[in-house]
Amino acid sequence: MKSIFQYFQLYNSLSKEAENAITEICSIIKIKKNQELQTFGHTCKTIYYINKGTARIYYYKDGIDITESFAFENNIIARVESLFTGNPSRKAIQILEDSEIVAINATQLFKLYDTYPEIERLFRKIFEVAYVDTVNRIEGIQFHSAEERYNALIAEEPNILKKVPLKHIASYLGITQVSLSRIRAIK
Amino acid sequence: MKSIFQYFQLYNSLSKEAENAITEICSIIKIKKNQELQTFGHTCKTIYYINKGTARIYYYKDGIDITESFAFENNIIARVESLFTGNPSRKAIQILEDSEIVAINATQLFKLYDTYPEIERLFRKIFEVAYVDTVNRIEGIQFHSAEERYNALIAEEPNILKKVPLKHIASYLGITQVSLSRIRAIK
DNA sequence: CTAATCCTTTAACATAAGATAAATAATTAC
DNA sequence: GTAATTATTTATCTTATGTTAAAGGATTAG
């Protein structure tokens, strides 16, 4: 298991004091499959890091459950549309496998930015990369067929089929479950 | 015409020294319609602010010209997939109306981050908002019809039809020009 | 272990958007 | 101002994906 500080190291190295300051505002959550880590309607004040397990961000669109994104081991998950705007989130975070999660108190984190520019820099870089990933995802959505998008997802995250129900993969890909089933049947 | 510092003020206020430091690394570019502000293949080292005019980021996908995004007066435009990764950009920036552009030298800007945490914070916030916009755009692409997306774009940017050829609007919406023409004919 | 619930597939039909081609309309270059 | 180029529309045919319904599998609760 890679620690959160090894993950941070990929973006920006931190002094021991900065690491300690972050440790102070983190807590570990053990949470079971199908539980809600965060629910709808509140302003998001937490950034999560997945030590172990799988989660998804989802919302309801015309009463239908839509998966916005998945997060797997050793990655960050946050509802940025609320975290960065202060608006209440229309989205929830659901756990898809029994998980161990680090919860970072974002209110306190943003205060640490004043004392530790290195921490502000770390999270700036983390979200810059997430931003680039999102820009690239648009290209995938607009210019690949559903079949191509499905194959690309499997190639990128080969274990996803063991971790995530197909209905969530379908909505993440922007297609119906029936369509996904048809695509899978062809092979 | 709103100055770039009035625009920055919306995100984070700057000391006079920080403003001066930024001014030092900016230059003004006057550039005519249909010119390329930046071309393919180089690592992007510039962030642009549009004082006046219109621009788009585009790329070729299987030989077809695709518009990734538009930028209008008093907004930032940057090829973040190159700026934040250091990879050469597959994308170019084209000017769509005679324009006046502020070019910010990003290499020097990133150096200023070390001296002026307030500048790092400013750009962190600018790109956090851009990131949120991109996350929201995915929702629009996946769960609205082409007609709904077209209507939403017109509602959000009513003057776009005077500024931008329909073929660019079509590729931005992820549809063919023929499809867009059909959608427009219905009304 | 069994019943109930939830997940996935299959089938039949409907529809939005793609592909290609050709006709107009608008813009640009000389 | 005219010719050449570029942009937009229209028409026809094709195809991927949506919609609805129903059946078969898998998982979960008691």
Image (cartoon, coloured by chain):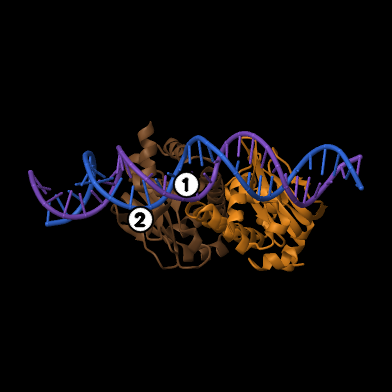
Chain colours: A orange, B brown, C blue, D purple
For the point 33% across and 46% down, which residue is it? B165
Note whether B84 is above or below A48 in the view shown.
Answer: below
Q: Mark 1 points at which residue?
A: B7
Q: Nearer the viewer, residue B59 or A123?
A: B59
Image location (x, y in percent) of residue A53: 76, 58
Going by the numbered disc 2, the residue's amino acid type is: Gln
**Quadrant that contains the N terminus of chain B:** top left
Q: What residue type is labelled 1?
A: Tyr
Instruction: Identify which residue, B137 or C9, lies in the foreground.
Output: C9
Q: In this view, does C30 lie to the left or right of A15?
A: left
Quadrant showing the C terminus of chain B: top left
Nearer to me, A128 or A106: A128
Q: Residue at x 60, y 59 (%)?
A: A153
Q: Nearer the viewer, mark 1 or mark 2?
A: 2
On the image, which quarter does residue A154 sit in?
Answer: bottom right
Q: Image check: B46 left or right of D29?
A: left
Q: What element carries label 2?
A: strand
Q: Residue at x 65, y 68 (%)?
A: A10
The residue drawn where x is 35% and y is 47% is: B167
Identify the secondary structure beneath mark 1.
Answer: helix
Q: Is residue A50 visible?
A: yes
Camera-side residue of B169 and B79: B169
Other-residue count near label 2 (Cα within 10 Å), few / some / many at <14 / 14–19 / ≥20? many
First in sequence: mark 1 or mark 2?
1
Could you tell me residue A93's position as x and y percent? Answer: 71, 47
**Distance from label 1 to label 2 (Cα)?**
22 Å
Residue A88 appears at what percent x and percent y? 66, 39
Q: Mark 2 — residue? A: B94
Q: Looking at the image, is D4 positioned above or below residue D1?
A: below
Q: In this view, does B187 lie above or below B78?
A: above
Indicate the chain on which mark 1 is placed: B
Q: In this view, does D13 lie to the left or right of A42?
A: left
